[in-house]
Image: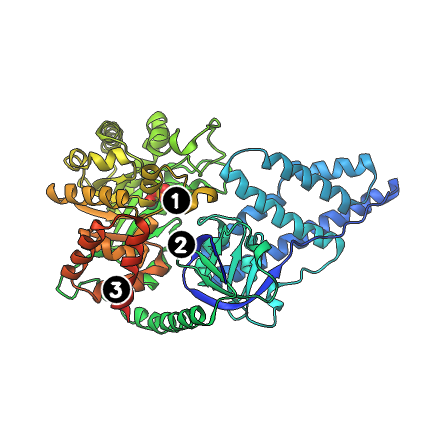
Amino acid sequence: MISLRGIAAASGISIGVAHKLGKEELNVPKHAISDMDIPVQIQLFEEALIKTRREIIVLQKRISTEMGQEEAQIFDAHLLVLEDRMLIEEVISRLKKDKLNVAFIFQEVLRKYISVFSKIEDEYLKERIADINDVGKRILRNLLGEERKGLDELKDRVVLVAHDLSPSDTAAMHKKNVAGFVTDIGGKTSHTAIMAKSLEIPAVVGAEDATLKINQGDMLIVDGSLGIVIINPDEETLERYHTEELKLKGITEKFLAVKDLPAITLDGNKVEINANIEFPDEVPAVKLHGGEGIGLYRTEFFYMNRKDLPTEDDHYHAYKYVAEEMNPYPIIIRTLDLGGDKFLSQFQIPHEMQPFLGWRAIRFCLARPEVFKLQLRAILRASVHGNLKLMYPMISGVGELRQANKILEEAKVELRTKGMPFDEDIQVGVMIEVPSAAMTADILAKEVDFFSIGSNDLIQYSLAVDRANEKVAYLYDPAHPAVLRLIKNVIDAAHNADINVGMCGEMAGEPSLALILLGLGLDEFSMPPQVIPELKYLIRSITLKQAKDIADEAMKLSTGEEIEAFARAKLMEILK
Ligand code: PEP
Ligand code: MG
């Protein structure tokens, strides 16, 4: 029995036989063509592009109805590749010059693109390589008249094992024949991981040499919650996981039964359970899963997959829609959090050695007040349509907060001058995601209406672990005593100043850690919509006193591993 550690991409347990998916190698012939063949080859190329476009649109529609708009939007990037004039023109000009068949030329151009992009150290561009590869393969297949051996043709229910899976591969999966999957590469926030979560297929990504260690037909246990893969487990382990798997299935039903009830502990203390969204069209999913508000609206995604910059009215209409749809529930709009691993082609951001420590989020906004103020005006204007709050990302100290508020005041003056109404009492909060902010939370608390802890970044900055780097992912430990101490400091400072404190990082939606957070006194939990029913069930199954005892015990332990194991055992007791 061997076990591998990877990154927990989609929670749940799956047990099944390994089905290894090799890299798809297409056999592309190379042959000379005559001048007369050139128009025919160009036509072949155009037809392949049209066919590919049609295929992607069909796939996108299917994903949109089965999984939701957000997942379907992933294919917008694929459609953009098909419209890339540079790529198309290069193929045609080389075809005319080299006089070789178009499939061969296209493959060469594709390889060149991928090799140029691969040399650039940029997470966003790395994602684009996956898109180009994915679409490129589709075009090639259509040029060669070959059909993809689809994942939907799998006969038995298997655990897929692959070096990497493209979003197209993931989209072609069906729960009925894919029990779980394991990949060598990829991070928690890769498109493939996002899709796995929506499909509710347990998945472990970034399990390094999984494809070398796992053989076709091996029995596998995929623990998508802990990021563990067990190869050929012994009887006892198999039995233990079988029991856990059955238990998990049974309790999902129980979770759904309480999704529309309030999150009140058994001794009558209410907390807020909110959702994180990236796009306005996720609002129906929030409501469907019983979300009581939006604790984080990541507005930077609004800038992606478009060539121009959104106008003030574009922003306003998006925020107005969310405000009206969610009314009277609160929505926390986070201002532009650009940089780190999120780059937008509309802004010329110089390449940096350490982008997560560089010109990011509020730092960028304070340096580009015109971009910032445009967004602030739009949020203010939309505030009359519902319960909007605004929040600044990556604040490191009170100085930045004051500068941001100064620009907010200017935006308010401009609107007043124009006679445009807005909520004069709009609440303003900060994300606590930099250790310096966590340590000075008492100072910040005096000048804001609320805090929201951005644990994704707080963990990376306090433990010095790049959140996007799979090589150091084993050190990325939400339960580390240092992280819990910082969080406790923030919660205590907020309560001393009589303000609300929430958390919108992934940690808030991790049930075992949520127990500790509840015990530490967190007021609001914001998470991906799919996790809400479970969290509500959990909170309704425990007293605040019990949670406090769990938090007290956890704070006495020495390592993240011990804390995680302790909290998980408590969770199992509560959920049994
Ligand atoms: C966080 O850092 O926890 C957070 C919610 O922000 P993001 O993941 O968008 O950086
Ligand atoms: Mg963050």
The tag earlier along the polypeptide, 3 or 2, is 2
Q: Nearer the viewer, mark 3 or mark 1?
A: 1
Q: Quadrant of the C terminus?
A: bottom left
Q: Position of residue 568 (x, y in %)?
A: 30, 60
Q: Position of residue 322 (x, y in %)?
A: 33, 51
Question: Distance of mark 2 from mark 1, alpha carbons?
Answer: 35 Å
Three-letter residue code for mark 3: Leu
**In this view of the protein, can residue 27 be seen by the observer?**
yes
Residue at image coords 85%, 45%: 31
**In this view of the protein, can residue 322 be seen by the observer?**
no
Residue at image coords 77%, 36%: 94
Where on the picture, by quarter, is residue 12? bottom left
Q: Which mark is residue 256?
A: none
Q: Position of residue 472 (x, y in %)?
A: 44, 42
Disc 3 target residue: 538
Disc 2 target residue: 281
Q: Is residue 365 above or below residue 53?
A: above
Three-letter residue code for mark 1: Leu
